[in-house]
Image (spheres, rainbow, N blue to C red):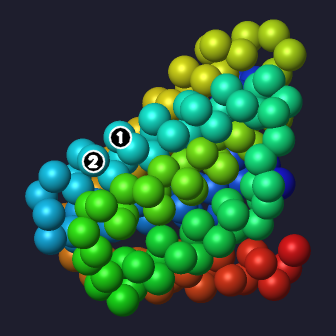
């Protein structure tokens, strides 16, 4: 399901957008101030690793269910004001990032893969920044709940 198309670059499904916003929201509300950069950077780094696997047709299990779960679980983490240690949050975000990247790598164009990856990285960073900005404005628990509910609605509709 395509959410947004910019030129010939597809920017994920709605579940992917929700998860990327939720990473920013979670980063903005974390007790550890390092999370503001650590969570998004970890997601993007893992996303590029997963992208390389997907582009080379190296399978990962349950990619699409994990992507859908990421929007629900990250939204719940924000809604419930969960503030785990970075030693827990970073691997969670990395796992979700790798799954998101794998899907994009597997779906990427036959030519222009590097430009596609660059656009994906920039769009992901922009969505994380939007989540951080929204998180700084407040009402994060409501936004997290809305993210989780939207993820559940997508799961039910699938």
Q: Is residue 2 left or right of residue 37?
A: right
Q: Which residue is mark 1?
A: 41
Q: Which mark is residue 49?
A: none
| Residue under the image location 12 percent in, 58 percent down | 33
Vertical placement of 147 versus 89: above or below?
A: below
> Where residue 40 sits: x, y (%)?
36, 47
Residue 134 visible to an observer of this rendering: no
Q: Is residue 141 left or right of residue 56?
A: left
- Give how far apart the Cα atoms at labels 2 and 1 are: 5 Å
Vertical placement of 78 versus 44: above or below?
A: below
Q: Quadrant where the C terminus lies?
A: bottom right
Disc 2 residue crowd, few under 14, some 14–19, many 20+, Cα 10 Å: some
Q: Is residue 114 left or right of residue 148?
A: right
- Comparing 149 with 4, the one in front is 149
- Comparing 79 with 136, the one in front is 79
> Where residue 96 sits: x, y (%)?
57, 56
Q: Contact, CB < 8 Å: mark 2 with mark 1?
A: yes
- Comparing 7 with 55, the one in front is 55
Q: Which residue is mark 2?
A: 38
Q: Quadrant where the N terminus lies?
A: bottom right
| Residue under the image location 77 percent in, 26 percent down | 55
Mark 2: which secondary structure? Answer: helix
> Where residue 110 sits: x, y (%)?
86, 16
């Amino acid at each position: 399901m395509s959410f947004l198309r910019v030129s010939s670059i597809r920017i994920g499904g709605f579940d992917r957008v929700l998860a990327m916003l939720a990473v920013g929201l979670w980063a903005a509300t974390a007790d550890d101030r390092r999370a503001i950069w650590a969570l998004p950077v970890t997601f993007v780094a893992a996303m590029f690793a997963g992208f390389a696997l997907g582009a080379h047709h190296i399978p990962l299990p349950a990619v699409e269910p994990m992507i859908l779960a990421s929007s629900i679980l990250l939204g719940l983490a924000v809604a419930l004001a969960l503030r785990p240690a970075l030693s827990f949050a970073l691997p969670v975000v990395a796992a979700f990032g790798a799954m998101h990247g794998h899907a994009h790598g597997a779906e990427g164009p036959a030519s222009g893969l590097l430009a596609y990856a660059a656009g994906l990285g920039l769009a992901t960073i922009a969505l994380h920044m939007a989540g951080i900005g929204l998180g700084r404005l407040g009402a994060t628990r409501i936004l997290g709940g809305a993210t989780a509910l939207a993820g559940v609605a997508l799961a039910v509709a699938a």
